[in-house]
Amino acid sequence: MSDLTPSIAEQVAKVASDFQQQRTGHTPRAVTVVLSKDTLVITLHGALSPAEQALAVNPEGAAKVQEFHRQLFASSSESLRREIRRITGLEVREATAEVETSTGIVVHAFTSGTMVQVFQMKENLPPGSWSGPQSEVPT
């Protein structure tokens, strides 16, 4: 049997999932990792605990959950940054976290000063339907 080396994306996903579990005690249901040029986006699906989901049912509670995750990420993301550098060989310049409380998704974005917009689709795009290799559109 041959040993399969995980891809960079798989390694980053594993580290991000472990990081979330260590910080919050709750393991995400799934992790998606996307790298486009100098921007790495990690999406943690189902990352909120049942208590956080219950708290987030009203606007005040949702704001508390969002602020908690922002502060927690800001104060503890150095180890995740180091792991990303170890895996990719690239230094992380900036990092931020956002929480979508209605879906329980936490997004970690590591950028170079660019604005990141993340859209969670209602369903998966069929395989092979993405239109070509161009990922950047000039404005």
Image (spheres, rainbow, N blue to C red):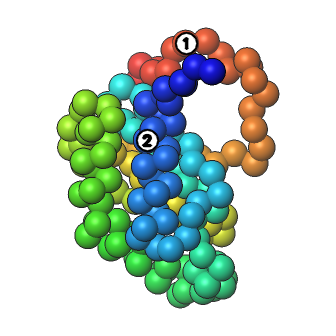
| Amino acid type, residue under disc 1 in the picture | Pro
Where residue 96 sits in the image (x, y, percent)? 34, 56
Q: Label 2 neighbourhood size at 10 Å, few (<14), some (14-19), many (20+)?
A: many
Q: Quadrant of the C terminus?
A: top left
Q: Which mark is residue 111?
A: none
Q: Nearer the viewer, residue 34 or 76?
A: 76
Residue extending farthest front: 1
Circle 1 residues within 10 Å: few <14, some 14–19, many ≥20: few
Where disc 2 sits, the SS reads helix
Query: What's under tag 2, amino acid-wise?
Result: Val
Identify the residue at horizontal 20%, vertical 38% (top origin): 91
Against 95, is 2 above or below?
Answer: above
Q: Nearer the viewer, mark 1 or mark 2?
A: 2
Task: State the quadrant of the N terminus.
Answer: top right
Q: Reply above or below: 99 against 40.
A: below
Foreground of the two, 42 or 10:
10
In whole angstroms, how far apart are the C-alphas of marks 1 and 2?
A: 22 Å
Residue 82 position in % (x across, y down): 24, 48
Q: Can I make out residue 112 in this image?
A: no
Residue named by callout 2? 12
Q: Residue at x 40, y 76 (%)?
A: 67
Q: Position of residue 128 (x, y in %)?
A: 73, 18
- Res. 26 image quadrant: bottom right
Lateral position of residue 11 relative to residue 71, left or right:
right
Query: Decide: marks 1, 2 in contact (CB < 8 A)?
Result: no
Q: Secondary structure at mark 1?
A: loop
Q: Is residue 25 left or right of residue 51?
A: left
Q: Which of the two labelled residues, at mark 1 and mark 2, occupies the earlier sequence position?
A: 2
100 relative position to 79: left or right: right
Q: Residue at x 21, y 43 (%)?
A: 93
The residue that label 1 is drawn on is 133
